DNA sequence: CGCACGGTTGACCTGTATCAAGCCGGGTGG
DNA sequence: CCACCCGGCTTGATACAGGTCAACCGTGCG
């Protein structure tokens, strides 16, 4: 079954085992039977590594698979005719990318690794095949897509109604929270993306991002040393986001 | 409060027939066999009417169903702790809403009818049941969700990188194009939403929206009479969007 | 060492928000 | 039927957040 592996490498190193993957609670539905888990393993045909700075897929690429991130962080970005570019998200271990490609059989955004990364390749055909038989997987796929839609609603709220500092605060809190879930510090993080990429994501220019960082540092909310950030006063940041003022 | 009443009207008038619905090419996958089409009919349990100004569902409502819009236009909007509100989209005939509810079994946005509307109620359980057997439907559901993700990417690009007039131009062109597909004029439209709602969607204040309308009218790109808009120079609007200038 | 690149900071400019006044069309009540 | 009002919209004057331009800094690398 999983001998359809496309990679000509040592099979053992490739041999996938979702069942024993420590990310499975992020990737997989819960409450699968042993037998189901066994079958779900076969959704992943192979793994693929992506070097820092190179793309997992690009706008226009033919779509085949979804990808579960094992290690590394990606950015996804769309562009318009003119050179404008918008980072639409930063994805990390356990998250699924490639959903954009399903509608038109071609990808509509670029996925670029911000550090050396490894992904599990899951051809949509296989996912669908299995989803027809394992209803928990079927629902899970729907949830993953729904989650992405809801996430994007949040970004729209951010872009449409928050001011620069609120955006950065929301961004930092979101990042650190997601990292925390993955076992990293709840208050410390290393940004894998440049200020420019942060700016693109937040709809701000690089100088504005930089100033917001400096302001937070000045006010003792965070400590910044290049891309290393320590959150000193998460409450204040949270207040900044929700409470913003009383409009 | 969304009432779950199964409209107590003549059953025949309710009896759904996707097979003969003139929106089926928007809602349904193509190339279904007669038998499959017959079964797909059963995805819709009933129809529901929604009066102008009232909600199909609200944030926090328990999630059961997706809805295919038969007539009318909806807006969906999310809010944050503080009163901020963001319109995340305007949906019209043939489009599917409710996808946001899947991930947490509760809706995360409000869907409000901007004019008297009618929707087909499609419980997710039924959809999934049938999708397990009709693979074209399965793929179709995935495409619908993927399309929504891609659409939102476009909105993020708009909110993150366009200036006021570009946003409005993009908005108008998008609306008129979608209406055109549905058999309306390719150059004339009646806005069902207020300037305020447009502003919320585009991340602009009402005054800015109004000024942009006036400017376009002054320049002869459009003709505006209250909510009635006629597009006089679509090319110029398109240029405004893509070409914006040579940054 | 020196260069390059990403980031910071300052000075200034501009697009959009804000505040305020007024307009228009539609509905209501005298 | 008109006077009035009301909500949605427009328009003008002004304020300000964030963009732009430019100089500079610091770190890492050839």
Image (cartoon, coloured by chain):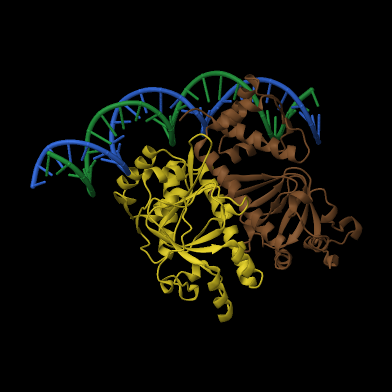
Chain colours: A brown, B yellow, C green, D blue
**The one of B66 and C23 positioned closer to us in this rendering:** B66
**Residue A70: image location, x then y, percent:** 78, 49
Measured along the vertical axis of the image, is residue B118 above or below residue B61? below
Residue D4 image-quadrant placement: top left
Residue A134 image-quadrant placement: bottom right
Left or right position of A13 against B59: right
**The one of B237 and A236 positioned closer to us in this rendering:** A236
Count of marks overlaid on the render: 0
Can residue A155 be seen in the rendering of this structure? yes
**Residue B122: image location, x then y, percent:** 54, 64
Q: In the current view of this chain or complex, which residue is farthest to the bottom?
A: B34
**Residue B14: image location, x then y, percent:** 44, 70
**The one of A45 and A50 positioned closer to us in this rendering:** A45
User: Residue at image x 43%, y 60%?
Assistant: B177
Measured along the vertical axis of the image, is residue A187 above or below residue B218? above
**The one of A23 and B40 positioned closer to us in this rendering:** B40
Left or right position of B219 against A84: left
Left or right position of D9 against B243: left
Measured along the vertical axis of the image, is residue A28 above or below residue D9? below
User: Residue at image x 44%, y 59%?
Assistant: B92
Left or right position of A60 against C18: right
**Residue A21: image location, x then y, percent:** 83, 51
Can residue A84 be seen in the rendering of this structure? no
């Amino acid at each position: 079954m999983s001998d359809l592996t496309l990679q000509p490498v040592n099979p053992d190193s490739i041999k996938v085992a979702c069942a024993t993957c420590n990310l499975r609670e992020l990737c997989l539905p819960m409450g699968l039977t042993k037998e189901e888990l066994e079958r779900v393993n076969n959704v992943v045909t192979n793994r693929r590594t992506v070097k820092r700075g190179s793309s997992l897929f690009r706008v226009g690429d033919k779509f085949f698979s979804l990808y579960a991130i094992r290690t590394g962080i990606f950015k996804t970005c769309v562009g318009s005719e003119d050179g404008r570019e918008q980072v639409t998200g930063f994805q990390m271990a356990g998250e699924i990318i490639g959903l954009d490609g399903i509608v038109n059989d071609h990808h509509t955004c670029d996925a670029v690794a911000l550090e050396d990364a490894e992904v599990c390749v899951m051809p949509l055909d296989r996912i669908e095949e299995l989803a027809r038989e394992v209803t928990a997987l079927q629902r899970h796929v729907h949830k993953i897509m729904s989650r992405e839609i809801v996430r994007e609603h949040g970004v729209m709220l951010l872009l449409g109604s928050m001011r620069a500092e609120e955006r950065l605060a929301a961004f930092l809190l979101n990042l650190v929270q997601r990292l925390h879930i993955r076992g990293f510090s709840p208050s410390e993080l290393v940004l894998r993306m440049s200020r420019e990429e942060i700016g693109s994501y937040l709809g701000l220019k690089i100088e504005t991002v930089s100033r917001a960082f400096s302001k937070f540092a000045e006010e003792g909310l965070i400590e910044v040393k290049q891309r290393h950030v320590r959150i000193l006063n998460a409450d204040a940041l949270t207040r900044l986001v929700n409470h913003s003022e009383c409009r």
